[in-house]
Image (tube, grey):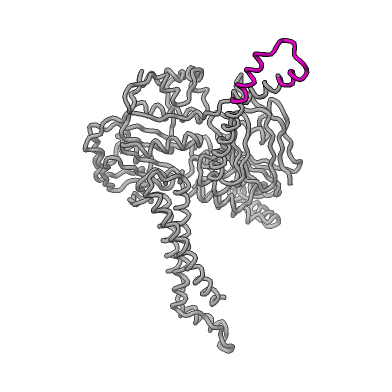
Amino acid sequence: MHYVSAKNIGKSYGIKPLFNQIDLHVNEGDCIALVAKNGSGKSTLLKILAGIETPDEGAVWKHKDLNVVFFDQDPELSEHATIIDNLLAHEHPLINALRQYEESQLSGDPEQINAATQQMEELRAWDTEAKIKQVLQRLNIQNLHQQVSTLSGGQRKRVALAKTLVDIGFDDQHTLLIMDEPTNHLDIEMVEWLEDYLNRERLTLILVSHDRYFLDGICDQIWELEDKVIHFHQGNYEQFLERKAARIESELATIDKARNRYRKELEWMRKQPRARTTKSKNRQERFYDVEKVAKQRKEETKLALEMKMSRMGGKVVELKKIYKSYGDRILLKGFDYTFKKGEKVGIIGKNGAGKTTFVNILQGQELPDSGKVNIGDTIIFGHFSQKGLEWKTDMRVIEYVKNIAESFELAKGGSLSAAQFLERFLFTPDQQYSYISKLSGGEKKRLHLLSVLFKNPNFLVLDEPTNDLDLPTLSVLEEFLEEFQGCIVIISHDRYFMDRIVDHLLVFEGEGVIRDFPGNYADYRIEKEASMQQKQTSSKPSAGAEKKKESSDNGGNEPLKRKPGYKEKREFELLTTDLKQLAIEKESIANRLSSGVSDYKDAEALSKRFQELSTEIDTKELRWLELSELFE
């Protein structure tokens, strides 16, 4: 079924055109990722497709039975209403039944409760209630009668996401879900759950996200908005990067060929008399077509991250017996740790486990209840916080940077003025004199990153640095952090980002327990999956108990079908566990190889291990199939 079409649509803000003459189509079952640089018009295009904004030119057609559900990057909620009122604001018989049931529970009136319960039964709304409860639980939304105006930014985002997921469950199957950065403010477990949920629901989806694992797990098409037009790619994000490189190479070859022809045609044009024949006029028209292609510029402007790191002494940071609580909630319980030079640490854990509090204590911005934090004399922190840019009064971009310093020292010697440094961060001279309040979310993030690096820190603390950054900028940031010689502490829900940068993890498990895990997030997931499988295996009843139960059920009269022995059962269980672990490890290695491994020896070792895993999986799968026949 055809859902949406756009024909020759264009949009500008002031004199700045975002895109023009765009044609696109969305069919039922499409799962599309929209990627572009910050400020290219991604969010605007999504809003046009959702019917929230209108294009300056062109037209958008939607199927008459289509229901469009839009999740905004900056969601709007009813401020003075409660969480549950916001969630159940959708007009639908099921929603109305749930709303009345909730109201009856609050009133305590037996007649009202009976009437509401009967309506729930008639509409079979209990499954819907269970689904809503699952969404709320997974997104850690509690106290449903709390007023929205009292929520933090992260809580508001999760409530808005829950409302979106609730809304898509109440209409017919012809629903188009449009989501703008849905993973911001979610912890890693929530992101993984959302990825699984969207896949299970089999939705038609258009998505903007910086999370590459999330994109690869959900989307099978990539729309790239670049130079005011859209390029369409089938496949996942990794395949898109390969095809984009091939496309750019082809375009450069076309431009180079046109330039050679342009030089010859230009010479002919200069020699021609003013009075031309029809034939020469046709050639003149072709000349202008060639000129248009020849004068294209395909050199991609990239963010340039370069800095002279301040010298780091022998002592970095020591934390001794750190305790921290808020009321009954324990965040740190006797935590000890000594940072070493060049260490790159990832921090993961559920929201509210104390991650942000920990990095604040680390930098001396917040005091522990007890314990000591010893910071080396040469340490200069660079803190990229979730709060983003902070300024007392609105000011121009160039003024904000000059308030930090007039010039910036480079790693290879020399220095840059504030204006030159801003240009390295893709701020044009016009943008430098724009007010900060006029910047897009991604541009503010880029300015925030600039302001952190402008101080030449040697210890970077990055709290959710990937939120709102576009994928090209994110790729450059990753390359910079890989080469950074100082210490790095990263809090991030972006699994790809963590896998590429960190050496090991501090896992905040709750109740003040922090585990030092030796590996990246992919390694941690493998270990966690293995642990869960082991628990499930150990919780299964013994072979003797199963045999006794079967004999009892049979009544002892008919001969029992031959069952596998204990050793065969044990081997089957171990094979099941091993195959899952091997598959996870194989996928992790494939992702690392596809993302690009800088060291040749590492790449060679990973390739060798990948072949070994493939052989081992094939062998164990054959044995697993043999044993599985005994269990039929």
Q: Residue furthest bottom?
A: 557
- For residue 34, what is the image quadrant? top right
Majority secondary structure of magenta residues: helix
**Magenta highlight range:** 259-283
Q: Is residue 552 visible?
A: yes
Compared to residue 93, the image places residue 361 above or below, namely above
Question: Residue 609, image x and y in percent?
Answer: 41, 57
Q: Residue at x 36, y 51 (%)?
A: 519
Horizontal and vertical percent for residue 348? 40, 46
Q: Which of the image's four quarters has the C terminus?
A: bottom right
Comparing 470 with 515, the one in front is 470
Q: Is residue 617 above or below residue 155?
A: below
Relative placement, left or right, of 509 versus 565 is left
Magenta includes 173? no
Q: Who is closer to the viewer here, 440 or 483?
A: 483
Between residues 381 and 120, which one lies in front from this camera angle?
Answer: 381
